Image (spheres, rainbow, N blue to C red):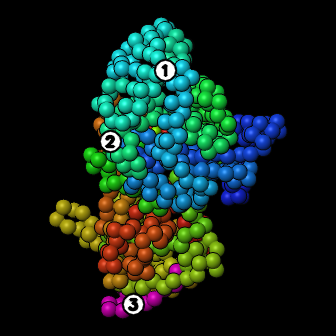
Amino acid sequence: MSSSTPRPDDEAVEAGAAGRDFIRDIIDEDNRTGKHGGRVATRFPPEPNGFLHIGHAKSICLNFGLAKEYGGTCNLRFDDTNPLKEDERYVRAIEEDVRWLGFEWDAEFHASDYYPALYDFAVKLIKQGAAYVCSLSDEAIRQYRGTVTEPGTPSPDRDRSVDENLDLLARMRQGEFDDGTYTVRAKIDMANPNMKMRDPPIYRIRHASHHRTGDAWCIYPMYDFTHCLSDSLEAITHSICTLEFENNRELYDWFLDTLEVQYHPQQIEFARLSLAYTVMSKRRLLRLVEDKYVHGWDDPRMPTIAGMRRRGYTPEAIRAFCEKIGVARRDNLVDLAFLEYCVRDDLNPKVPRAMAVLRPLKLIIDNYPEGEGETLTAINFPDDPPRMGERTIPFCRELYIEREDFMEKPSKGYFRLAPGKEVRLRWAYLVTCVSVTKDEHGEVTEVHCTYDPESRGGSPADGRKVKGTIHWVSAAHARPAEVRLYDRLFTVPSPDAEEDFTAVLNPESLQVLEAFVEPSLAEAAPGLRFQFERQGYFIADPDGTKDRPVFNRTVALRDGWAKLAKANVTQG
Ligand code: ATP
Ligand code: MG
């Protein structure tokens, strides 16, 4: 599942008192030696080119969590250096998602705030003889770079004079040149065993409007150059990123050392989160949205924070999940079941129970007086009845039960309804199946029962044992509802490993059912959560209307039967 064992200590999770890990060890050591003057300053640096996903949540919990634990600060920094891919809409969505997860940043910055400063740093590098303007195309730069076993070839422009470089940079900035004609490159070492050190580009020309700076710039700084300097300008102490940036650390340090900046943050890498049966890169998630494989960034099947919110996951559950998977340097693929476990664990004590029939089958009580009815009492949270009080549910002669709760020829160990068998209707009576009605295809359309009037509330007067309990709604009072059931979006554990990840999409990831819910649910405001007994946790979706609510299944109950068996002991 994950490389670290989940810790059952929920109170610690709630309090944000995280466990030990190598990053906390580094910080403790830094605080002991006074390396950063005892300060802890972190940042979460998303690129606003898509919505945040559960992998980002891990980074958010880590960065904001460290700041909280050590009495430090955490900034939200938008790493917005690629105007072609970024958008204000994503900035807003990211802010919303970080807040929803329960974190507030000390300051908000945008790498684009630093464009003037970064430009000055580029000028400084050129003056130091540590950068030059290069006329090689991207393709040529790649070819000249060499391989891991062979050194690269210097650019013909590598020894351009400082004056010429400064002149060309100024003209790049003024818009004199087309995209791709020049780059600015750091002058480091074309034979360095670390390919990242072979004169990496630090500026490129891009005649494109930026969502914040508009047309003020037509040259844009590259990630490696921007990131370390943004960290330094914000006086970050620990710059935490994912493992694929390990080789970039040397470059990170080179820029800061060469430019002799005041603050030199320490880059620390940790293993990114991968979830089974999911893709996580924003590029791929964008493709799912744009090509309409899903209904948007907040489609409940998406691993995005917005999708999980709409699906009914809670911030507490996501934080607990991030906490429990822990931080390490070894890559791991976390099982979806573990995330679902965290969601159930959080929802179980929080949400009221209710009854909904997802795949209805008519049940008629032959000996119940026609045209009459009664009101029964149901407990909203049977594990601890006083906590969420009671509600009333209407009962009458015709009900709906779950199609799968009836079997004409029951298999061994089937304790639900079958011809001649008796079951308990939750909060109501004991009923015994006496006959069935079928359509011309031989499918059962109605189940006829008799009820025991002495068993009101679910307990028979003579104390006889009835094993099965099923849920139901009154046919005359139930309200129609759309119920959306979600399954994993992909059919294989590692869709990223496929040549075409869209070829392994699960065609059954969304199932829409016409269900019946008890009347109290009809007006559930969007965002309200319930446990539909024996079915799972559900949340009312904003797509619902007054006449027809929509419920999304957040997560199924793992073991509805065992739970209900236990509840019956307290019910009678
Ligand atoms: P993606 O490939 O999904 O676009 P990214 O790393 O390019 O991810 P950024 O917006 O640049 O996305 O990421 C912001 C921060 O979140 C970075 O510090 C990054 O390391 C971290 N992050 C992104 N994905 C994960 C993940 N799967 N697990 C942990 N941290 C992640
Ligand atoms: Mg990125």
Separation (CA) of disc 2 from disc 3:
70 Å
Q: In which quarter of the image is residue 461?
A: bottom right
Task: Answer left or right for 522 relative to 45.
Answer: left
Give coordinates of residue 424: x percent, y percent.
48, 74
Residue 504 visible in image: no
Q: Going 37% across and 31% down the picture, which residue do you hit?
A: 171
Is the residue marked by circle 1 packed among few (<14), some (14-19), or many (20+) residues within 10 Å? some
Q: Which of marks 1 and 2 is in front?
A: 1
- State the mark number for residue 373: 3
Upstream in sequence: badge 3 or badge 1: 1
For the residues labelled 3 and 1, say whether their Cβ atoms are less than 8 Å apart: no
- State the mark number for residue 52: none
Q: Residue tagged by mark 2?
A: 208
Q: Going 31% across and 30% down the picture, which residue do you hit?
A: 177
The amino acid type found where label 1 is placed reads: Val
Separation (CA) of disc 1 from disc 2:
28 Å
Give coordinates of residue 197: x percent, y percent.
53, 20
The amino acid type found where label 3 is placed reads: Gly
Mark 2 residue's CB less than 8 Å from ligand 2: no
SS for callout 1: helix
User: From the image, which quarter does the C terminus lie in?
Assistant: bottom right
Q: Looking at the picture, does residue 119 appear above or below residue 181?
A: below
Q: What stretch is highlighted in magenta?
A: 364-378
Mark 1 residue's CB less than 8 Å from ligand 2: no
Give coordinates of residue 434: x percent, y percent.
35, 74
Q: Residue tagged by mark 1?
A: 162
Q: Which of marks 3 and 1 is in front?
A: 1
Q: Looking at the picture, does residue 280 appear above or below residue 426?
A: above
Task: Answer left or right for 255 relative to 373.
Answer: right
